[in-house]
Amino acid sequence: MPKNARVTIQYGPYEACGVVESRKARLAGLEARLTAEGHSVSFQEIENWNAVQILVNGETVYKCGIKDLDYGGDGIIDPLCSEAVKAVEEAY
């Protein structure tokens, strides 16, 4: 995939401290890694619980559970962020 791809991160609600809602805090590292590679990132809430889907050109290239991502941070040491960036880079 060439640089500057348009990446959409879809994310669903999850439970934290007894409250269920959609939050982007666990996506900060993923966003940081993708923007560092030159991609533009947009977010879209979905209804699927505990879900993250990454779309490039309308096609899903990566999926994981949102609670599996590290909370906050820059995503450098999160292995799932590395997998997601690789999936975006290999998309065509």
Image (tube, helix red, strand yellow):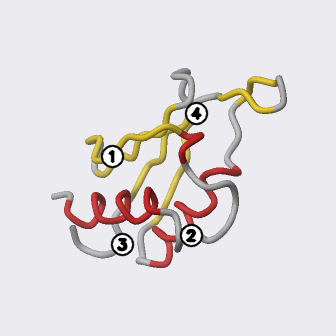
Q: Secondary structure at mark 4?
A: strand
Q: Secondary structure at mark 2?
A: helix
Q: For mark 3, what is the residue?
A: 4
Q: Relative to the observer, which residue lies in front, 27 or 45?
A: 27
**Three-letter amino acid code at the position of disc 4:** Glu
The alpha-carbon separation of the residues under discs 3 and 1 comes to: 18 Å
The alpha-carbon separation of the residues under discs 3 and 4 comes to: 22 Å
Q: Quadrant of residue 4?
A: bottom left
Q: Considering the image in quadrants, where does the N terminus appear?
A: bottom left
Disc on the earlier residue, 1 or 2: 2
Above or below, 41 relative to 62? below
Q: Residue at x 54, y 44 (%)?
A: 68
Proximity of marks 1 and 2: CB atoms separated by less than 8 Å:
no
Q: For mark 1, what is the residue?
A: 62
- Residue positioned most to the left: 92
Disc on the earlier residue, 4 or 2: 2
Disc 2 crowd, CA 10 A, few/some/many (<14, 14-19, 20+): some
Disc 4 crowd, CA 10 A, few/some/many (<14, 14-19, 20+): some
Proximity of marks 3 and 4: CB atoms separated by less than 8 Å:
no
**Three-letter amino acid code at the position of disc 1:** Tyr
Q: For mark 4, what is the residue?
A: 45
Q: Nearer the viewer, mark 1 or mark 4?
A: 1
Above or below, 70 relative to 89? above
Q: Quadrant of residue 92?
A: bottom left
The alpha-carbon separation of the residues under discs 1 and 2 comes to: 17 Å
Disc on the earlier residue, 1 or 4: 4
Q: For mark 2, what is the residue?
A: 32
Proximity of marks 3 and 1: CB atoms separated by less than 8 Å:
no
Disc on the earlier residue, 2 or 3: 3
Please state if 60 lies on the left or on the right of 51 as rendered: left
